[in-house]
Image (cartoon, rainbow, N blue to C red):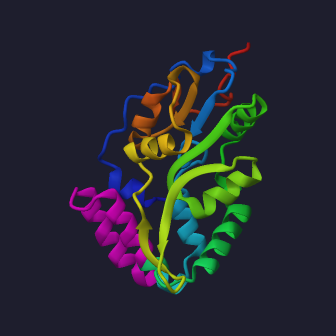
Amino acid sequence: MQTWSHVAVARRQHPPAQRLRGAEHAGSLLNALAVFDFDGTITRGDSLVDFVRRVAPRARLYMCMPRVAFRALAFAAGRRDRAAFKEDVLTSLFAGWRAGDFDRAAEGYAAAYLPRLVRPAALDRLRWHRAQGHRVVIATASLEAYVRPWARRHGIGEVLGTRLEVDASGRLTGRLEGRNCYGAEKVERLRALVGDIERDRMYAYGDSRGDRELLNLAAHRVFRPFRGPQPVSDGTS
């Protein structure tokens, strides 16, 4: 299935594929911090597209497709930034929803459909970090509304994601609450959450240029992990 990101970003090059940069040799570090991107790192592909396909009302989705396609072309041509394009899509599909109804739909999606997208090796690595007593954080441009309940089911309580604005009547506006959690925003929000970051005690996992700043924080970083038949080594073998 072709996604918005495939359509809109096909012509853009990703950073060089530095598949392993120390994380495979790091072993277990005391008091370590492990930060994971979500889409494309923990999951196979774009979870937002899958979420929209399964949750947005079918009639509204079909009605909005021409507008979304036009905005995607504008984004691909550089005339619309990433956050504005995301707001265009979310406003078209979810503006006016009651926040409680949206949260319930997001939780249902996280339980029923999101597990199908998760890479088994990524889940193994998350579990390994938790078993070592590491602090695990997910930092993602995906919607926090469905990433957080998925993470909670796997014992991860700290999620930095993109949030949707709710108006005074308790309905979604479709606009983002704050910034899109992408690129430098991931680092800013991570620092706000954890305070000072010790480079030598940080693991980071990401798959796109939106993770570049995050990966650069960590001495133990992996770009585009969990794609082969073997999970990333814990460094003990």
Q: Residue 89 colored magenta?
A: yes
Residue drawn 29% across the image and 47% down it = 11
Q: Which residues are magenta?
A: 62-91
Quick one: which residue is furthest to the top in this view? 237
Side (left or right) of 42 relative to 73: right
Judged by its main secondary structure, the magenta piece is helix
The picture quadrant where one finds residue 186 is: top left
Is 216 or 229 nearer to us in this picture?
A: 216
Side (left or right) of 54 relative to 140: right
Residue drawn 39% across the image and 58% down it = 179
Residue 227 seen anywhere in this rendered image of the structure: no
Question: What x and y, as percent, mark residue 147?
Answer: 62, 57
Question: What x and y, as percent, mark residue 116?
Answer: 69, 55
Q: Is residue 12 above or below residue 202?
A: below
The picture quadrant where one finds residue 80 is: bottom left
Tell me the quadrant of the picture where the C terminus can be found: top right
Residue drawn 63% across the image and 72% down it = 103
Is 167 or 91 nearer to us in this picture?
A: 167
Question: What x and y, as percent, mark residue 184?
Answer: 38, 43
Q: Is residue 195 above or below residue 167?
A: above
Q: Residue 191 colored magenta?
A: no
Is 111 or 62 nearer to us in this picture?
A: 111
